[in-house]
Amino acid sequence: MEMSELLEDYGCLTFSDDVMRERIPKSTYKAFHAALDKGEPLARETATVIANAMKIWAIEHGATHFTHWFMPMTGLTAEKHDAFLEPEGNKAVLEFSGKTLRKGEPDASSFPSGGLRATFEARGYTAWDCTSPAFVKDGTLYIPTLFCSYTGEALDKKTPLLKSVDALNEASLKLLPLLGLDDVTQVTASVGSEQEYFLVADEYYQKRMDLKLTGRTLYGSMAPKGQELEDHYFGSLKRKVSAFMKDLDKELWKYGIPSKTKHNEVAPAQHEVACVYRKVNITSDNNHLLMILMQDIAKKHGLRCLLHEKPFEGINGSGKHNNWSVTTNTGVNLFNPGSDPANNIPFLATLACTVKAVDEYADLLRMSIASAGNDHRLGANEAPPAIISMFLGEEIDKIVQAIIDGTEMEEVDTGRFKTGVSVVPDFSKDNTDRNRTSPFAFTGNKFEFRAVGSAQSIAGPNTILNAILAEEMTEMADLIEGGMTPKEVIRKFLTEHQRIIFNGDGYAAEWEVEAEKRGLHNNKNTVDAMDCLKEERNIEMLDRLGVYSRVELASRYEILLDNYNKTIQVEALTASKMARNEIYPASVKYLKDVTKTALDVKETGVDNAFLVDDVKELSELLAAMKTKMDTLDSEIAKAQACDGDIHEVSLLWRDGVFAAMNDLRETADTIETKVDEAYWPMPNYVDLLFGI
């Protein structure tokens, strides 16, 4: 496809603002944007005109149905398709009203609600998110929506995200005039999301029950080669992978999703796609659509796209780096230090609020990226640790220290980068290096929240980021209005919360010891991370800001732990079935044949001791495997039978079942190294990682 075609097709499947402006009267368009700018409900008449234009546009692009597309607490997206067609006597007409655009009524009883809805209470509502553009996919008009219960509680991830955007805007508009920014009328969070993923051959995927049911390999000994040669990172793309990436880019651009970068990641078979910054709720929608398209397009190329945080043991897992900044309608990025950061009061104030926010609410940030999948990754020698800390870089750190010490800031000259090659010109260096071991790193004009899991919705983490920054901005504004100067409050915040700043190696064992001395949280698993949702200070803050109500937070505690329990249950049942029905029988068959060979060799009069050793070793391993299979099944039954509260049940899945799974895997993976590959019942790591 020629570049001119790509440019012409960009956003062609999206009912963008430009498309809307072309297709509705100017007065309606102005009324629509006036409502958005003022944060007011959209008038019914305006919605009706837009709905008609949207219907005509969608039909022109092949749509026969429409769906209210929402993000339930499953962490995925949901959709129910309705036809535009409506019978009218002996004929049919195409109908799509303003009311239909603004409101839908899906069954809410079967989605996770954490006790907000009883099974017999089915009514729920979807409400059009008019800040995010609709699009056409596979003959259906997709309308981004919120999802709430009949009684008004949020049953989704988008509603709290939009509420956090409102909270951040309100707090910013209170603070910024006190810092000299008087002309700002709107502030919003912008996010760029980097998506890591694995690609494996579909023929191998189909033969792995664990990949099909859980998204990760529950068994598998490491291949002789992994990522130790560091030859895959930024390496040349394999033809099949390159073809997939080209098709993915073309589709993303059609939906107006600005994918910018693609490359091989560190682990074999691992890759990444990164998109340009957009407003946070649009980026959230875009990322969900991106994940759907990746999996669909991979199938067309004979591949499978794995989004699990840890599909393979022994090599890196996948994250979703969340690049977060806060910008004004006047074009000011509040995280941009500018040419004179030491005297850039809006920047220093926003930085100080962020430092305080991350320190005071590190437990909420850790909770926001907690999942059974991400537990495999956080704290491993490949990803940010479970300890939440901040990296600022040399220049900003020196400014912070000077503010705390009350000393004059010495000018920091980052200098110019010189290659030492005469024909290559030098160039200016960034004001900070990168720290890949930090979960929350300043990268020049934004913070990169590196701990988000690859399969997760970015809505949750960004809801917390927006909310905690709004909380601290409000407090700073109150202190300034109470008589303190901006510089005094900035110094106060930085001095009291400097402990969260760590510019060293987050992977080092010494950091855990140091972090404990500093009093920082180190919640290494989801069960522990969820405890913060029971803390009154967190509940009060989020409720007061209007981001989550108390009952909504209680429901999230139940939903997230229940999701953890069910994830471990599916993995454990799959692990048990694979062990009993595939690995154990295949290994026993190989043992039988080796035993027969040993006897045949003995009959020839040749010393068969070497084969007898193999028989003994494999027999002992299989006996241990049999015991461990029984132990796993016993632990599963114990967890399933527990009638305690959700936390008690979660402890059984974590400490009993998950531990038993790992113990069984260790033995099964050792057996794999002893068994002839011809007998092994599933593709191995060599096939999966190097089979494209």
Image (cartoon, rainbow, N blue to C red):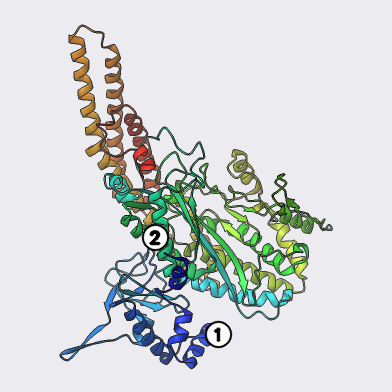
Residue count near mark 1 (Cα–Cα under 10 Å), binned few <14, some 14–19, many ≥20: few
Q: Quadrant of residue 130?
A: bottom left
Q: Estimate the x, y position of residue 215 in percent, counting from the top left.
A: 35, 50
Q: Estimate the x, y position of residue 585 in percent, counting from the top left.
A: 21, 33
Which quarter of the figure is the C terminus placed in? top left
The residue lying furthest to the left in this view is 90
What number is the disc on residue 303?
none
Which quarter of the figure is the N terminus placed in? bottom left
Q: Which residue is mark 2?
A: 247
Q: Earlier in the sequence, mark 2 or mark 1?
A: 1
User: What is the count of numbered marks?
Assistant: 2
* Contact check, label 2 and label 1, Cβ < 8 Å: no
Q: Estimate the x, y position of residue 62 in percent, counting from the top left.
A: 30, 76
Is 286 placed left or right of 593 in the picture?
Answer: right
- Distance from Cα at disc 2 to Cα at disc 1: 40 Å
**Which of 178/261 is in front?**
261
Q: Which residue is mark 1?
A: 38
- Tell me what residue is drawn at x 45 percent, y 37 percent: 226
